[in-house]
Image: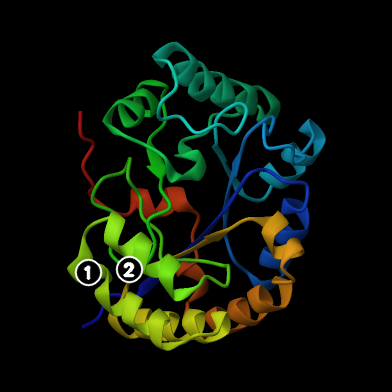
Amino acid sequence: MTAPLRFTTSWDDGHPLDLRLAELLGARGFAATFYVPRHNREGRPVMTSAELRALGAGFEIGGHTLDHVRLTGLPAAERDRQIRDGKRRLEDELGRAISGFCYPGGAHDRATRRAVRAAGFRYARTVTNLSLEPPRDRFQIATTLQLFPHRPLTYLRNFARRGRWRARALPLAICLGDRSLDGCLEDVLRFAAARGGVFHLWGHSWELEAHGLWGALDRFLRLAGALVAHEHRVPNAAVIAGDAVSQPA
């Protein structure tokens, strides 16, 4: 018997539009994890403390460094400060501990993963796409699809660079055959619902606004609502809690 599909979503960068996104997710009955920096060196706004607390009242919050900087290549002291101080600021503002982290830009290496673990995080998410498998390494959590109209070459590059090719080959083939974003999302989700595993959607609220993707997200959530039971719509931390995954040194 096929195990039921678990469905999770995560959203990066802490933009104020995350509040609009949370409203849509809540209205459709879906959980989410929001990975939030406290500043953004790329110039985009981030939520105020009051907005962060409002979001955190209904959704999981995770770390995304203090200033939204890629960690690989930084001096070790600055890397550790970005991870540690970002976590401390979020916890101070929320009044509770956080357990999850997302690598800005997906950039990580062994030293970065060790630093994230040493800071007290229990898991970390990457930008590896096309995965439907339960996580094996809680500091290299993969995703299924980004809510963005990628070109076929982008899917191919992500597939080629990020390993576990056999497990990711069928979702890749589906997305290469479905040239529309809606088609890719729907067909991969239906495939996942038939086989079980974990479907992990991710994206950025500012990207939804910039590219007019709110309708695509709403249509997809309506479809997912018909295919995924309420008890299997979970935040990222619940996916990790439900699996016996490794914690490499």
Q: Position of residue 81 (x, y in %)?
A: 51, 16
Between 33 and 85, the one nearer to me in the picture: 85
Circle 2 sits on which residue? 132
The location of residue 18, given as percent across then percent down, is: 72, 52
- Of the numbered discs 1 and 2, the one sitting upstream in the chain is 2
If the image is split into quadrants, where does the C terminus sit? Answer: top left
Residue 137, labelled with which disc?
Answer: none
Residue 121 visible? The answer is: yes
Residue 32 vs residue 198: left or right? right
How far is disc 1 from disc 2 in space, using C-alphas?
Answer: 8 Å
Measured as percent of width and height from the top left, residue 108 is found at 37, 37
Q: Residue at x 27, y 69 (%)?
A: 168
Q: Secondary structure at mark 1?
A: helix
Residue at image point 55% right, 31% down: 69
Residue at (36% x, 79% y) in the render: 192
Of helix, strand and loop, which one carries label 2? loop
Q: Which mark is residue 167?
A: 1
**What amino acid is found at the position of numbered circle 2 in the picture?**
Leu
Say if mark 1 contacts mark 2, CB within 8 Å. Answer: yes
Nearer the observer, 126 or 194:
126
Residue 26: image location, x then y, percent: 69, 64
Q: Where is residue 124, by image quadrant?
A: top left
Nearest-to-viewer mark from 1 and 2: 1
Disc 2 crowd rating (10 Å Cα; few below 14, some 14-19, many 20+) is many
In the image: residue 205, left or right of residue 194: right
Residue projecting furthest to the top = 77
Kindly identify the amino acid type of the residue bearing the numbered disc 1.
Ala
> How many numbered discs?
2
Q: Vertically, is 27 above or below 39?
A: below
Does residue 89 appear left or right of residue 19 in this picture?
left
Image quarter where the N terminus lies is bottom left
